[in-house]
């Protein structure tokens, strides 16, 4: 039987503190609703006393969201607690999160106080918060660098004062997994009354240990994790929700259930990233663009034979339904065949070999070959098979202070003829050469060039519209070389006239 791990999301509080990530109230409501859909247990919606905007956001989120507990952060200050309670008045289920620094650094240099006075302030804040709400969480800021014996005394006092959840933040991201796990175990074993409260992890990622520390915390008795979407947060960020959730989901034998609807992870990640203007690094675990992308031929072949050869998580479990096989110059025939099959084309044997050679031509020029490129490739193959006139070669000289000259070679059912022409630009010169070779009488009505996506290495699409003896003929091609695409499109149109 699995044990419940509560997911406390602080994307809208610790995450939103990051410079440049600030959201307005409507955007915060959108994120809060996405978190509710994801199934988080607690949403830390803000720090109400910090600004009227934060106060308003906590209040509006309390109205808009009904399933998760809504939480407001405070310092161990009465005014903060009163304002937080007021901002939470519409919440169906509410929590006040109050606390104070407990490390030597904080006691001496932040509060100029003593250990005993800090315990008194901590207990008094919890008692005061309990006047407004039943659910009070206490944080011992910088607990990661707080001596365990003293920390246990603080926690004992706040549990006795009525705290129902105890947060042990590794505020500076300093601890190592073993150390953090041992801290949680120490508190579990040495604090009187700790069974009345839930221990919570709150880890920062300064040494890249946030997820490992949180997991060690849970394995040693914590039953709540404080996390953010995409791991956003102060400095190197907080523990990322998706990493902890998927770690426990993929290691079922640990018997920890987060209750998260994992299929919503990918879209929630994208929403947070775009609203907060915070791109996700491509190799970020679970939600990075490359997290499930296989690019080497050996891995692609292995995954196609059996997904589990190289995947520990089914991408569909986190809401990724696109193919995870990236088509690059390192892909083999199996990967190309697989993607074409998804697109509805069945190529085998020599046909597949020929297409694969053309695919490699594109892949050598582009980093990633996408479905639009393949569509063009398949379309071009089908068209080329039917064409009487084919573009055999094209050479263009052009540039500033140079008269553009194009030499075009056209293949007429196996016989190749060449023509060299000048023009007012490279395309004009090439089109004149084609016209001289085909002796066709037509008027170019329209010439349209489009890049498929972005980037200088992308495939360009060219559409032409030709008029001949009162009829309209269309030509089309796509190529990373835009001049070749233009001449191929023209030849395609002329073939139709022929
Ligand atoms: O990192 C931290 O210590 C915090 C507390 C305010 C909970 O974010
Ligand atoms: Zn924090």
Image (tube, rainbow, N blue to C red):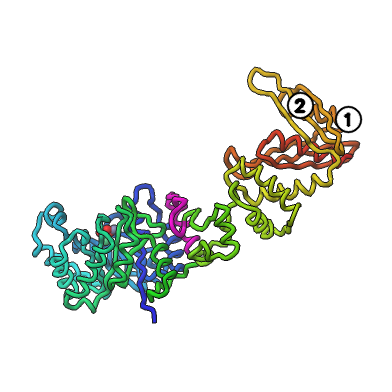
Q: Secondary structure at mark 1?
A: loop
Distance from the alpha carbon under mark 1 to that under mark 2: 16 Å
Residue 343's x, y, as percent?
68, 58
Q: Is residue 215 above or below residue 409?
A: below
Q: Secondary structure at mark 2?
A: strand
Which residue sits at x=35%, y=72%? Answer: 6
Quadrant of the rendered image containing residue 9: bottom left
Residue at which label 2 appears: 407
Which residues are drawn in magenta? 265-287
Residue 121's x, y, as percent?
14, 65
Q: Would residue 448 appear left or right of 70 to someone viewing this image?
A: right
Residue at which label 1 appears: 439
Q: Is residue 82 visible?
A: no
The answer to which of 134 and 182 lies nearer the viewer is 182
Q: Quadrant of the C terminus?
A: top right
* Residue sitting at the far top: 401
Q: Would residue 186 appear left or right of 430 to someone viewing this image?
A: left
The answer to which of 49 and 21 lies nearer the viewer is 21
Q: Which mark is residue 274?
A: none
Q: Would residue 300 appear left or right of 286 to someone viewing this image?
A: right
Q: Residues within 10 Å of mark 1 (few under 14, many from 20)?
A: few
Q: Is residue 112 above or below residue 261?
A: above
Q: Nearer the viewer, mark 1 or mark 2?
A: 2
Which residue sits at x=88%, y=32%? Answer: 440
* 280 in the magenta segment: yes
Which residue sits at x=38%, y=76%? Answer: 255
Which residue sits at x=70%, y=33%? Answer: 483
Quadrant of the rendered image containing residue 12: bottom left
């Amino acid at each position: 039987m699995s044990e419940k791990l509560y997911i406390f999301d602080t994307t809208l509080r610790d995450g939103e503190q990051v410079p440049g990530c600030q959201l307005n109230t409507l955007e915060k409501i959108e994120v809060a609703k996405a978190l509710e859909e994801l199934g988080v247990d607690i949403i830390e919606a803000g720090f109400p006393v910090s600004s009227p905007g934060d106060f308003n956001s906590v209040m509006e989120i309390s109205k808009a969201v009904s399933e998760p507990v809504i939480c407001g952060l405070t310092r161990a200050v009465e005014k903060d607690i009163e304002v937080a309670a007021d901002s939470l008045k519409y919440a169906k289920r509410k929590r006040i999160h109050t606390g104070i620094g407990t490390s030597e650094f904080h006691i001496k240099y932040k509060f100029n106080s003593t250990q005993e006075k800090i315990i008194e302030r901590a207990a008094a804040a919890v008692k005061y918060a309990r006047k407004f709400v039943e659910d009070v969480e206490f944080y011992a800021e910088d607990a990661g660098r707080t001596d365990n014996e003293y920390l246990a005394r603080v926690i004992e006092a706040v549990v006795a004062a009525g705290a129902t959840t105890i947060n042990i933040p590794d505020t500076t991201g300093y601890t190592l997994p073993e150390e953090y796990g041992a801290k949680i175990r120490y508190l579990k074993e040495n604090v009187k009354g700790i069974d009345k409260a839930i221990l919570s992890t709150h880890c920062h990622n300064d040494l890249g240990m946030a997820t490992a520390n949180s997991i060690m915390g849970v394995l040693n008795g914590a039953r709540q994790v404080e996390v953010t979407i995409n791991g956003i947060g102060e400095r190197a960020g907080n523990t990322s929700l998706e990493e902890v959730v998927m770690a426990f989901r993929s290691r079922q034998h640990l018997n920890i259930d987060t209750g998260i609807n994992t299929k919503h992870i990918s879209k929630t990640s994208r929403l947070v990233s775009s609203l907060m203007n915070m791109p996700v690094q491509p190799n970020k675990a679970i939600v990075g663009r490359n997290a499930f992308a296989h690019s080497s031929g050996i891995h692609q072949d292995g995954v196609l034979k059996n997904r589990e050869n190289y995947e520990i998580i089914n991408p569909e479990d986190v809401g990724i339904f696109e193919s995870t096989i990236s088509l690059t110059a390192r892909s083999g025939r199996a990967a190309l065949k697989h993607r074409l099959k998804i697109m509805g084309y069945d190529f085998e044997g020599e046909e597949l070999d020929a297409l694969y050679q053309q695919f490699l031509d594109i892949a050598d020029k582009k980093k990633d070959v996408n479905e639009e490129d393949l569509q063009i490739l398949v379309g071009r193959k089908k068209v080329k098979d039917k064409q009487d006139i084919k573009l055999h070669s094209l050479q263009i000289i052009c540039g500033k202070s140079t008269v553009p000259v194009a030499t075009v070679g056209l293949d007429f059912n196996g016989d190749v003829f060449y023509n060299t022409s000048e023009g007012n630009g490279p395309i004009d010169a090439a089109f004149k050469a084609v016209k001289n070779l085909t002796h066709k009488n037509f008027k170019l009505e329209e010439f349209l060039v489009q890049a498929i996506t972005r980037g200088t290495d992308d495939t360009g699409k060219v559409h032409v519209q030709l008029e001949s003896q009162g009829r309209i003929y269309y030509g089309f091609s796509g190529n990373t070389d835009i001049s070749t695409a233009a001449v191929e499109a023209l030849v395609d149109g002329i073939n139709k006239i022929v």
